[in-house]
Image (spheres, rainbow, N blue to C red):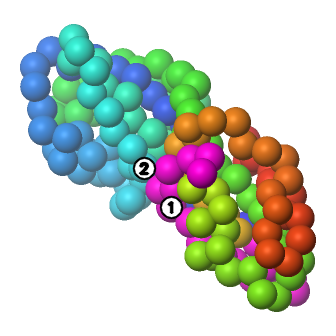
Amino acid sequence: MSFKYRVVTIVFTLDYTIPPFRIISDLERYFDISNCVVDIKAFSGDVIACTLCGKNVVARVKNTDTVFIDRMCVKYKIVESNIICIKVKIPYYNVGEEDLNRLLKQYANIMVSEVQYVENTTVYFCILELRRDLPKRIKSKAGYLDVVEIV
């Protein structure tokens, strides 16, 4: 299984305005992993919510409570968000990544998705932002597919 399909959302405040690209590059430099920032949102009062992915990044975020952004030590809190990871085992040959993306678009905004082949089994991994409840089973053209959330 790919280790990038673990997510955590952190919230922190900044004393002054910093461009989002600077926040992303500083977080990637701090965790020493490129493309670990999945989503970044700014709210009023300079509150920033940032969703990070990767098994090593999630473990490091859970063990500490500070990051360095713009040469400042910033304390953060881990929060729950509507961005989740899912895994779908595909037992049928004629169901592809595009088909699953199309089926899931009615429930969520898809951020990252890929199909991997693990031990003679096709597995679809996806990071998505939920808009409404995701069912446990999705009906495709070949049959039903079981959806499992990765925690």
The structure residue drawn at horizontal position 79% and vertical position 69%, both measured from the top left corner, is 140
Side (left or right) of 135 relative to 56: right
The structure residue drawn at horizontal position 15% and vertical position 15%, both measured from the top left corner, is 15
- Which residue is the site of mark 1? 112
Residue 84 position, x and y percent, is: 61, 43
Quarter of the picture containing the N terminus is bottom right
Question: Dot 1 surroundings within 10 Å: few (below 14), some, or many (20 or more)?
Answer: few
Q: Measured along the vertical axis of the image, is residue 136 above or below residue 65?
A: below
Q: Looking at this rendering, what residue extends furthest in the top direction?
A: 45
Side (left or right) of 149 relative to 46: right
The structure residue drawn at horizontal position 37% and vertical position 61%, both measured from the top left corner, is 34
Mark sitting earlier along the chain (1/2): 2
Q: Are marks 1 and 2 in contact (CB under 8 Å)?
A: yes
Residue 26 position, x and y percent, is: 24, 44
Q: Is residue 53 visible?
A: no
Count of numbered circles in the view: 2
The structure residue drawn at horizontal position 37% and vertical position 28%, both measured from the top left corner, is 49
Q: Quadrant of residue 23?
A: top left
Residue type, mark 1 in image: Val
**Residue 112 in magenta stretch:** yes
Residue type, mark 2 in image: Val
Q: Quadrant of residue 138?
A: bottom right
Question: Dot 2 surroundings within 10 Å: few (below 14), some, or many (20 or more)?
Answer: some
Residue 79 position, x and y percent, is: 53, 22
Q: Which range of residues does the magenta coloring cover? A: 106-123
Q: Measured along the vertical axis of the image, is residue 73 above or below residue 33?
A: above
Side (left or right) of 6 relative to 134: left
The chief SS type of the magenta part is strand
- Which residue is the site of mark 2? 38
